[in-house]
Image: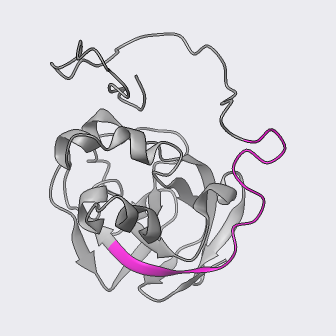
């Protein structure tokens, strides 16, 4: 099982065909043995650009492309479900304001950008390296909180079989520290 809410990651015997989810469980270790010990999320992010800006007005509503969106510190993008506290995973805490994903990953697994359910599609930058770091999207300052791992809910809305190819590649959850406008073509550094 993997993700939040959890979903079946690998089930060769086909025991979980009913889309079973774990409601409660134990975390065995915070260490992922498949990631390097010295720099588990990568050493350098590089510089990239915003390829698309996407919002959805309500939970499970289709994502919509916009040329630009106002970044609201402590809330999210204006016009998006999370800025209004109406997202499926809206909750108090860190990492619920902004989600980013790499265009190269989505293109590789042939997942349309709108189906990825992330706010910002980026190109040319390694998002994993931004976990725990401050970065800028144009003039907007953000902080990377954690990886946006895939979940059963994403599979339900997009298509089955997305968990495995998106493990550690599902994007970045971030918070907005200073407001401004995020536009297609903005530099990310």
Q: Position of residue 182 (x, y in %)?
A: 46, 80
Q: State the residue lying farthest toward the front.
A: 12
Q: Position of residue 152 (x, y in %)?
A: 29, 34
In this rendered view, identify the residue nearer to me: 21 or 24: 21
The magenta-colored residue range is 36-53
Q: Is residue 138 above or below residue 160?
A: below
Quarter occupied by the C terminus: bottom right
Q: Position of residue 10 (x, y in %)?
A: 37, 25
In this rendered view, identify the residue nearer to me: 121 or 61: 121
Name the magenta segment's main secondary structure: loop
Q: State the residue lying farthest toward the right.
A: 38
Q: From the viewer's perspective, is 90 left or right of 81?
A: right
Q: Is residue 156 visible?
A: yes
Residue beneath the point at 55% across and 57% down? 175
In this rendered view, identify the residue nearer to me: 55 or 103: 103
Residue beneath the point at 72% across and 58% down? 133
Quarter occupied by the N terminus: top left
**Exactly how many numbered labels are in the figure?**
0
Q: Position of residue 53 (x, y in %)?
A: 36, 75
Q: Is residue 119 visible?
A: no
Q: From the viewer's perspective, is 48 left or right of 80?
A: right
Q: Is residue 62 above or below residue 187?
A: above
Residue beneath the point at 25% across and 65% down? 114
């Amino acid at each position: 099982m993997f993700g939040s809410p959890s979903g079946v990651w690998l089930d060769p015997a086909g025991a979980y065909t009913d889309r079973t989810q774990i409601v409660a469980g134990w975390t065995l270790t915070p260490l992922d043995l498949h990631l390097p010990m010295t720099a588990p999320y990568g050493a350098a992010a590089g510089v990239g650009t915003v390829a698309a800006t996407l919002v959805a007005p309500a939970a499970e509503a289709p994502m919509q492309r916009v040329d630009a969106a106002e970044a609201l510190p402590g809330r999210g993008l204006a016009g998006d479900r999370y800025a209004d506290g109406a997202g499926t995973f809206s909750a108090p805490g860190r990492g619920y304001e902004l989600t980013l994903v790499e265009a190269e990953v989505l293109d590789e697994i042939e997942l349309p950008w709108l189906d990825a359910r992330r706010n910002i599609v980026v190109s040319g930058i390694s998002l994993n390296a931004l976990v725990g770091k401050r970065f800028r999207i144009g003039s907007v300052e953000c902080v990377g909180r954690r990886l946006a791992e895939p979940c059963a809910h994403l599979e339900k809305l997009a298509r089955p079989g997305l968990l495995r190819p998106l493990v550690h590649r599902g994007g970045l959850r971030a918070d907005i520290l200073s407001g401004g406008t995020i536009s297609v073509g903005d530099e990310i550094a």
